[in-house]
Amino acid sequence: MSNTSKYIFVTGGVLSSLGKGLASAAIGALLESRGLRVTIQKLDPYINVDPGTMNPFQHGEVFVTDDGSEADLDLGHYERFISSPMGRNNNFTTGKIYDSVISKERRGEYLGGTVQVIPHITDEIKDSIRLASEGVDIVIVEIGGTIGDIESLPFLEAIRQFKADVGKENAIYIHLTLVPYISTAGEVKTKPTQHSVKELRSIGIQPDILLCRTQMPLSDSIKSKIALFCDVEKDAVITAKDVECIYEVPLWFHREGLDSKIEKLLNIWKGAPKLAAWKDLIERIKSPAHEVSIAIVGKYTNLTDSYKSLNEALHHGGVSNGCKVNLLYVDSETIDADNCKKLLEGADGILVPGGFGPRGIEGKIRAAKYARENKMPYFGICLGMHIAVIEYARHVAGITKAHGTEFDENTPDPIIYLMTEWYDERSDTVQKRDSQSDKGGTMRLGAYSCRLEPDTIAHNAYKEENIFERHRHRYEFNNDYKKPLEENGMRISGTSPSGELVEIVEVSDHPWFLGCQFHPEFKSSPMKPHPLFASFIKAAFEYSEKNEGE
Ligand code: GLN
């Protein structure tokens, strides 16, 4: 483990949703552009061991890493902004920390001592922070929650101690706060920031840098005032202005001098950052030549954070095609035979994302049918692939009762089902399941390899034969139905290396109709838009051009 890493702790004050995850990711991008090896870790104060069981409607999407951990969606931001991949050491929760301490206590590792928050929990937190430092120059540690929350106290105490452990040139604190503009007074107010910093200092943490979320750039005199009251240097008061596009944040921070201030405080000298790629990206995002609309037919449509990575991946696909991508959220439960056309005809492509449970399934099947029959691009992800298969079986292959056992346990034609036995390449074991295992921790999670067939939409997009993509699901394509589907024009374009697990399906006589068992959205970034999203948006653009011409 490297002991030369330096640490940046990011806390948040005043209120939640100020964009701490994004700020941490943007700081990471800036430092990476100065040639530093960076990773980012999220410490979450909630009791769940991981967010795997949390409702995306309340908490936003569950992000999946290559190594198969189910993580906070902020890890998605991190991967979109920096190049080091995230893994299980990048996200710890109170639950995970306590779980580990309690297991040690049960094994007698504390030698009869009384196990307490300080030092046992705080030591466990500090060990977890060090775990992320392997092979990197900088570890950015984002503390979830807001200063003042009871549950984040052990994390704050741990990071307070950390600076003393590693020395002051190796650890700094950045506090994200709000400087609201009060229109009736016609001025911005610094009091919430003062109070938040006071709260932070009461637990022994003196921030080194303040990132001030605000609607307009802070004037010199406001910066001086904040510096004076909060005891930070004036050039450490950074305007974090609201921006149109999240990928502008690194550039804004740079203009405010944030990266050089960090380097000064941490005593690192790397010279000017290379920001041309970020500038070029913003340029392309801000001047799209075309526009397309994608209908996302799903369940959690009133909280856009539930589909965070998906939304971003669609925008990335737009960037590589010079297209602005408008997202239309359609609640699948509202789609019926009468309104289907009306709800979907304005779109240039339909995307059915991942999901769980039977709610809204028939609406999604209608959407897939509409896309297939109207030659509108269709992209089905995980559950969306199951939908594509069921729809094709029912309406093209004549298997009219085809269904998934997740939606109807007793279906006579279980075309999507729980595979009872399959080879798992990640654990190199044969996995067994029965009807009882469906509620347990039996998901196929993390990156698996997939072999692509030549001359398919998938192969044309990836231009590679073997790909690795991330999974999070239980149900699989039932190979007993391979033959009737293939005979009726469905193409299996990607499988696990042995051919046992179907990974991608396509419709042959359709310009772009594809369902994949994995979640490509987790691997897309603005600098490297995912090939399937780039290809889907291209097809949507071609569809829109054709329809305009008619
Ligand atoms: N519910 C489906 C399964 O478990 C799909 C999961 C998903 O879309 N992530 O297989």
Image (tube, rainbow, N blue to C red):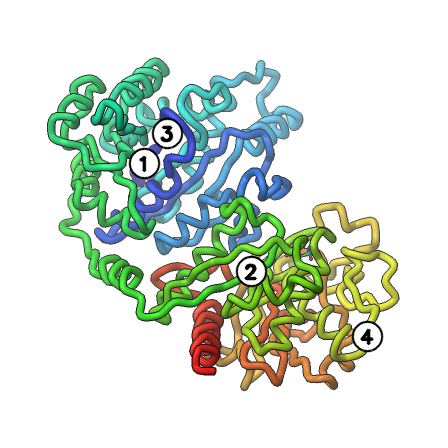
Q: Is residue 409 left or right of residue 442?
A: right
Q: Residues within 10 Å of mark 4 (few under 14, many from 20)?
A: some
Q: Is residue 172 left or right of residue 482?
A: left
Residue 26 percent location from the top left of the image: 31, 46
Nearer the camera: disc 2 or disc 1 = 2
- Gap between marks 4 and 3 measured at Cα: 55 Å
Sequence-wise first label, 3 or 2: 3
Q: Which of the pair 482/154 is nearer the observer?
A: 482
Residue 121 percent location from the top left of the image: 51, 23
Q: Residues within 10 Å of mark 3 (few under 14, many from 20)?
A: many
Vertical side of 500 occupied by 11: above or below: above
Kindly identify the amino acid type of the residue bearing the numbered disc 2. Answer: His
- Tell me the residue at 66%/58% (across/down): 335
Q: Is residue 467 left or right of residue 272?
A: right
Q: Which residue carries the number 2 mark?
A: 519
Callouts 4 and 2 close, C-beta under 8 Å: no
Quadrant for the N terminus in the image: top left
Residue 292 percent location from the top left of the image: 43, 67
Quadrant field for ligand 1: bottom right
Kindly identify the amino acid type of the residue bearing the numbered disc 1. Answer: Tyr
Vertical side of 8 occupied by 415: above or below: below
- Tell me the residue at 29%/41% (across/down): 242
Q: Which of the pair 325/109 is nearer the observer?
A: 325
Q: Which residue carries the number 3 mark?
A: 12
Q: Which residue carries the number 1 mark?
A: 7
- Gap between marks 3 and 2 measured at Cα: 31 Å
Nearer the camera: disc 4 or disc 3 = 4
Sequence-wise first label, 4 or 2: 4
Q: Which of the pair 180/204 is nearer the observer?
A: 180
Q: Which residue carries the number 4 mark?
A: 399
Kindly identify the amino acid type of the residue bearing the numbered disc 4. Answer: Ile
